[in-house]
Image: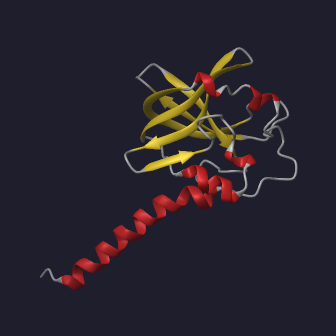
Amino acid sequence: MKNGRQQRPLGRALLIAVALVFTLPLSAAAEPPADMQGWEIDSPYNKLYDARELDSFKGYVRKIYTLVPMPGMAPATALEVAESEEDFNVVHVCPEWFAGPGDIGIRRGDRVKVKGVWVEIDGEFVFMASKVKKGDYFDFKVRITKDGTPFWTLSPEEQEKHRN
């Protein structure tokens, strides 16, 4: 028998799930270490990001993992995003200490749109993300789109201002 009591738990669960989706990116960010280990705003790695070259592509997430973007750097959370069966792109999302593979709200098999810039590191082209969008309601933002400033170099208040 369907009545208001039986339907309320489902409604509450849906409300909680929606609330988690919107707050996950806020809770994922950790305090940056005293030494950002190559992720500083003026580091050689971050200097590669040129916001004037903003680009985007869509695809399916094949893999979520960590990698070291450049020698001496702390590990990054990265994605492999397939645009087709044969063609995939390596996407650098953010430092793992900022948000690890399990903290970004993206899962293997998700269809995503990634915004950011193409850069060449050690002869390989990779995509440095500013935002990973999944569906109509979920964005994981890691850089200010207009100038490429990394969120991990901002205060929590500044991050919140730019998440919207």
* Nearer to me, 74 or 164: 164
Q: Quadrant of residue 71?
A: top right
Q: Residue at x 78, y 39 (%)?
A: 39
Q: Is residue 75 left or right of residue 108?
A: right
* Nearer to me, 144 or 75: 144
Q: Is residue 155 above or below residue 88?
A: below
Q: How many marks?
A: 0
Q: Is residue 151 left or right of residue 70?
A: left
Quadrant that contains the N terminus: bottom left
* Nearer to me, 34 or 2: 34
Q: At which x and y percent is residue 21?
A: 46, 59
Q: At which x and y percent is residue 86?
A: 45, 19
* Nearer to me, 140 or 157: 157
Q: Residue at x 69, y 39 (%)?
A: 149
Q: Residue at x 66, y 42 (%)?
A: 94
Q: How is the image coloured?
A: secondary structure
